[in-house]
């Protein structure tokens, strides 16, 4: 196990290093000058040049890459060109929106998927199963931003139960803050719940057909007891993997939903920074999200390998 | 029997409740939340050009020697009065006394000298340096600010009213971008990046106190979100509401007022006068006749906007209505193209910045041009790219943008301005205009200028951008027009 | 037989693919013609689905939008297959050796990047447009097909007849091409339809934020974005493009499920 851990950690680090190179190169070759954007149409050439020096844009690319990476390692994600504040601060602020949103959506997704998946699996072939499968087919096919638009039309504009967007802020109270994340979380959760339901169901079905299940039934356990005692636990492994993957998707993939609901999260930050050519913010935020995804995958792999020793040697 | 302790508790609870109710009622009447599309990158109006900066700080946090009134007139601000020498070269400004900055330091003539010197300095990052180009020297003579010019300039008082000419203090100059310190009736309270900026009332303001205790600017760039926020009551006003198609819904709702006024924004189809075949005046004329302004105003702005025939604001008394020279006539357009030897049409680029007037207007114009055989390749750009490619790089054929500075017809006298129009007669005219102080002569010159740029079909003159604001019906005092990019809250109050 | 999924899926896909193909030669109206006076018309005999905010015929817009989405998804999946399959096969053929390790690490690297985010980054930074959207989506299809082909090929390599061929001296590349490929085709087709539907969703998402096909080329995602402020005035403008996306993706998913059950009995689970 230790060897496996060591090997996986090395791979993790290597992936991160290559990722940072890829991110840096992809973004730095971009046309568009942050300094002229900040000063606008009527600014003079020398004014813009002065600002470029002030922002450190005159240094060579390798020098900028190295200073950026060393900064990342020490937790200094650089200073935003446009806002002149440390990127780490900005990211921390946005995290208070993106992270709770991802968790909320994940919770909703699991709360829906578990009962639905288990129920469908236990009533396989029946009418409930068919309905659940049909609904999940729909849920997977709906573009979540369209669903978001429809949610806003109904619940915000027509019924006024929720505001159409914006984040009330944690200062306004836990309930208010969660309320403003509800419609976005639902929009995000729908496709995820659909996928998770199907995975839960198929995983359960697979397990229920295994030999050890037949043994349990032969031993005299009722179908339901067999389901709860043995099937679920074993079926959880692939389900947990998917949940882990969904979490990292939700964190980074909420970018369009954040736009629809104008939430001040990481996704909007990236959009705004790309638009204003605030390269350092884009690079650092993308790296943070990559880190999140890589870490989650890493942890999931570890958990998987710990649970099932057979997986440690093969891939 | 009720114990004393319990009585006390009941009483204090009642008082607390009363106070809570009182303050929350009070808060509703002296707080205002204003929506804005673009967030300023920083809060120093003298260091960066983003209009969004002035929209937050102008007249609220910072003041200059003069300022703009809501009708565009130039009014005294920090300068109590001034005298101009007969030769028009020396101005003497007497400042108000007892003026303090938000950090407590007093305003004196040295601060004015400092501010103007700073703006004019070699390494200054002031985006409107040319406003000060004509200033020879600025001196403090017994607390009177003496400005000596190189040439007589009818525009000086006007120039000093701009946001780029506000007065700052040396003690606080380094903090301007993030924690601005000015002399205005509001103080900076806090800034949540990407979300909002909060201002609070300056209790030590030298002039007439404002009626608001707190003002919050919230940044909402998406038009759908702006609509939803106003409807939900998250905002009290959105002075430059970005979705004109929603305005009828606000008009129909008694909770809101729709305030429509004018701006100084001439929305034009800028044409690269040095790029083939746009360098041919016949081609530019063809383009002018291919455009149907009413379709653009209806289709892109849902009817809000005034057609213009030249680069001048229609509400300005010196305006000449030259729309007749570019009437919608596709047949004439095709004939002109044939005359120019381009009977088969040609292809060019149309680069569009983010605002709706550009994106939507662009799609409509593209269709109109296609109808006469001119094919355009549309590129939707962000502002940073637009500045890089179009404005600095001059790498474009056509673009749509709104020039919002007041009285900016002078840009046509700069041959290396992005549309690259080079007419020596026009340049001479503007030069004489700049030193002319007689108002009647100035008007005549302006009219002549308009005629020249129209006859040369330098750009496609589309419409004057309307200021379409939405506000709560009980909120009064908001500016109807936008003579400068600002959200002057000094006269705003809640009606009971 | 699992025709329950296959038939509806097939017909939905046929519907939208035909619309897309026909749009190349004919649409009821010209989608580049803006006629403000004809805007916001309700469905009628002339305009079967009404007109939009520019007076353009909605039916024609949806047809050309189908073409845009399908073309982008098609080429993106094509790129994924073109590069991914050979990579996967090569990795499987050289299992355990350096080339296998490299390809797998490469896969992991691409998987580590949040796809949507990177697609947005690429298109926003290098310029929005159909081509960059195709590249951005295509990049993320490569590791999917690489991993799939590798996994399937690996189990095939253990088969007796493959080992026999190897012993007979047949080259690795020839074996991959002649024996392995045909046997994994079914798997690839099924995955292809899944990736296709994901591609449609991705293209719609990119277009929604303005990074996909540019005006005047219609695109379902952009139609949705344009309809946002008009949703109360004309809900039809928001409902129709969304439905189009939904039905196309649904059709592809159903088709994929049906194909999986039909083509390869071994893949069939007791569902």
Image (spheres, rainbow, N blue to C red):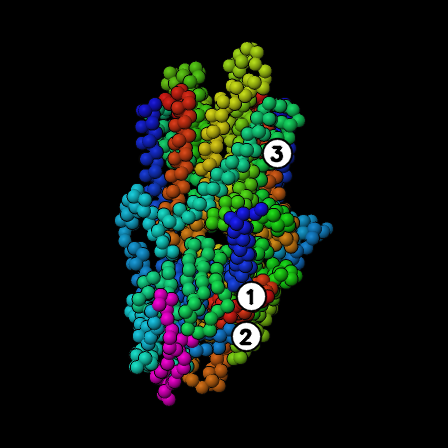
Q: Is B451 or A54 nearer to us in this picture?
A: A54
The numbered dot on residue B314 is 2
Give residue C186's position: percent from left, percent from top. Answer: 52, 26
B256 versus B94 height, above or below? above
Q: How many marks?
A: 3
Give residue C33's position: percent from left, percent from top. Answer: 60, 57
The numbered dot on residue A135 is 3
Give residue A200's position: percent from left, percent from top. Answer: 53, 27
The residue depicted at 36 percent of the width and 87 percent of the height is B85
Label 3 SS: helix
Q: Distance of mark 3 from mark 2, alpha carbons?
A: 58 Å
Residue B302 lies in quadrant: bottom right
The residue depicted at 41 percent of the width and 37 percent of the height is A293
Give residue C42's position: percent from left, percent from top. Answer: 69, 53
Quarter of the image with the C terminus of chain C is: top right
Label 2 SS: loop
B261 versus C203 height, above or below? below
Label 1 SS: strand
Return the chain for callout 2.
B
Q: Mark 3 or mark 2: which is in front? A: 3
Return the chain for callout 1.
B
Task: Residue under label 1, please give it.
Answer: B494
Q: Is residue B84 magenta?
A: yes
The residue depicted at 41 percent of the width and 33 percent of the height is A297
Q: Distance of mark 3 from mark 1, alpha carbons?
A: 51 Å
Q: Which residues are magenta?
A: B77-104
Furthest toward the bottom, the residue is B86
Do dots 3 and 1 share one subunit? no
């Amino acid at each position: 196990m230790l060897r496996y851990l060591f090997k996986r950690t090395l791979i993790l680090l290597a992936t991160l290093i290559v990722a940072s190179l890829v991110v840096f190169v992809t973004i730095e070759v971009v046309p568009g000058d942050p300094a002229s954007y900040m000063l606008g149409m009527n600014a003079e050439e020398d004014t813009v040049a002065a600002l470029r020096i002030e922002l450190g844009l005159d240094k060579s690319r390798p020098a900028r890459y190295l200073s950026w990476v060393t900064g990342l390692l020490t937790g200094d994600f650089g200073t935003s060109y446009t806002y002149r504040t440390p990127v780490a601060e900005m990211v921390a602020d946005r995290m208070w929106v993106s992270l709770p949103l991802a968790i909320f959506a994940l919770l909703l997704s699991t709360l829906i998927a578990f009962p639905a998946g288990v129920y469908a699996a236990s009533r396989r072939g029946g009418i409930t199963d068919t309905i659940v499968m049909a609904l999940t087919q729909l849920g997977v096919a709906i573009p979540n931003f369209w669903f978001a638009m429809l949610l806003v039309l109904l619940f915000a504009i027509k019924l006024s139960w929720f505001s159409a967007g914006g984040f009330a802020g944690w200062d306004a109270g836990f309930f208010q803050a969660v309320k403003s994340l509800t419609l976005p979380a639902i929009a995000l959760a729908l496709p995820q719940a659909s996928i998770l339901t199907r995975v839960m169901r198929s995983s359960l079905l697979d397990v229920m057909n295994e030999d050890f299940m037949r043994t349990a039934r032969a031993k005299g356990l009722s179908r339901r007891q067999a389901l709860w005692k043995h099937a679920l636990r074993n079926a959880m492994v692939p389900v947990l993997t998917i949940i882990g993957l969904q979490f990292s998707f939700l964190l980074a993939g909420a970018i369009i939903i954040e736009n629809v609901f104008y939430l001040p999260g990481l996704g909007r930050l990236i959009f705004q920074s790309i638009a204003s050519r605030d390269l350092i913010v884009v690079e650092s935020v993308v790296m943070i999200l990559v880190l999140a995804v890589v870490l989650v995958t890493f942890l999931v792999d570890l958990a998987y390998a710990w649970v099932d020793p057979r997986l440690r040697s093969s891939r | 029997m009720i114990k004393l302790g319990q009585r006390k508790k009941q009483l204090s609870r009642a008082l607390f409740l009363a106070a809570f109710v009182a303050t929350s009622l009070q808060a509703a009447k002296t707080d205002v939340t204003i929506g804005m599309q673009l967030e300023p990158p920083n809060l120093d109006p003298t260091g960066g050009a983003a209009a969004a900066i002035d929209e937050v700080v102008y007249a609220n946090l910072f003041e200059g020697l003069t300022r703009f009134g809501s009708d565009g007139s130039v009014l005294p601000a920090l300068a109590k009065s001034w005298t101009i020498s007969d030769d028009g070269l020396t101005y003497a400004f007497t400042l108000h006394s007892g003026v303090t900055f938000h950090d407590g330091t007093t305003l004196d003539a040295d601060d004015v000298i400092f501010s103007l010197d700073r703006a004019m300095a070699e390494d200054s990052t002031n985006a409107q340096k040319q406003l000060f180009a004509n200033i020879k020297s600025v001196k403090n003579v017994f607390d009177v600010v003496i400005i000596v010019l190189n040439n007589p300039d009818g525009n000086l008082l006007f120039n000093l009213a701009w946001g780029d000419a506000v007065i700052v203090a040396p003690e606080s100059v380094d903090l301007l971008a993030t924690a601005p310190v000015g002399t205005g009736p509001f103080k900076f309270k806090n800034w949540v990046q990407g979300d909002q900026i909060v201002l609070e009332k300056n209790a030590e303001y030298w002039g007439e106190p404002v009626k608001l205790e707190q003002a919050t600017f919230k940044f909402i760039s998406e038009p759908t979100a702006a609509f939803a926020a106003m409807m939900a009551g998250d905002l009290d006003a959105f002075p430059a509401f970005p979705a004109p198609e929603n305005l009828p819904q606000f008009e129909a709702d008694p909770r809101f007022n729709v305030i429509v006024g004018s701006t100084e924004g001439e929305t034009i189809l800028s044409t690269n006068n040095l790029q083939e075949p746009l360098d041919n005046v016949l081609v530019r004329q063809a383009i002018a006749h291919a455009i149907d302004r009413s379709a653009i105003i209806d289709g892109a702005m849902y009817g809000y906007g005034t057609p213009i025939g030249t680069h001048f604001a229609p509400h300005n008394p010196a305006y000449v209505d030259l729309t007749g020279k570019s009437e919608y006539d596709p047949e004439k357009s095709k004939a002109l193209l044939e005359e120019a030897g381009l009977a088969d049409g040609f292809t060019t680029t149309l680069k569009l910045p983010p605002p709706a007037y550009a994106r939507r207007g662009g799609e409509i114009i593209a269709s109109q041009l296609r109808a006469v055989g001119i094919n355009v390749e549309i590129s939707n750009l962000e502002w940073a790219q637009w500045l890089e490619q179009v404005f600095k790089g001059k790498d474009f054929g056509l673009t749509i943008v709104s020039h919002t500075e007041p009285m900016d017809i002078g840009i046509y006298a700069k041959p290396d301005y992005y549309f690259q129009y080079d007419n020596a007669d026009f340049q001479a005219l503007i030069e004489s205009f700049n030193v002319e102080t007689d108002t009647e002569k100035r008007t005549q010159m302006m009219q002549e200028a308009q005629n020249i740029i129209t006859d040369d079909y330098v750009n496609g003159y589309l419409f004057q951008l309307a200021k379409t604001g939405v506000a709560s019906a009980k909120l009064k005092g908001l500016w109807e027009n936008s003579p400068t990019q600002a959200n002057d809250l000094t006269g705003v109050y809640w009606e009971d | 037989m699992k025709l329950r999924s296959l038939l509806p899926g097939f017909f939905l896909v046929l519907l939208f693919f035909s619309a897309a193909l026909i749009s190349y030669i004919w649409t009821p109206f010209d989608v580049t013609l803006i006629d403000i006076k004809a805007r916001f018309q309700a469905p009628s005999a002339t305009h079967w689905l009404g007109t939009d905010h520019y007076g353009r015929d909605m039916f024609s817009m949806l047809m050309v939008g189908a073409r845009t989405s399908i073309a982008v998804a098609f080429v993106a999946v094509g790129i994924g297959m073109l590069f991914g399959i050979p990579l996967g096969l090569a990795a499987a053929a050289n299992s355990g050796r350096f080339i296998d390790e490299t390809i797998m690490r490469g896969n992991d690297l691409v998987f580590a990047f949040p796809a949507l985010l990177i697609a947005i980054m690429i298109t926003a930074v290098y310029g929005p447009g159909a081509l960059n959207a195709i590249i951005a989506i295509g990049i993320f299809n490569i590791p999917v097909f690489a991993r799939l082909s590798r996994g399937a090929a690996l189990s095939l390599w253990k088969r007796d007849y493959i080992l026999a061929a190897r012993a007979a001296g047949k080259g690795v590349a020839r074996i991959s091409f002649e024996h392995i490929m045909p046997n994994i085709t079914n798997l690839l087709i099924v995955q292809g339809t899944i990736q296709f539907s994901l591609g449609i969703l991705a293209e719609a998402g990119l277009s929604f934020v303005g990074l996909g096909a540019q005006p005047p080329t219609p695109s379902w995602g952009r139609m949705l974005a344009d309809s946002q402020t008009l949703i109360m005035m004309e809900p039809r403008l928001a409902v129709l493009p969304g439905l189009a996306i939904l039905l196309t993706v649904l059709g592809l998913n159903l088709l994929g499920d049906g194909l999986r059950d039909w083509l390869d009995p071994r893949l069939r689970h007791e569902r």
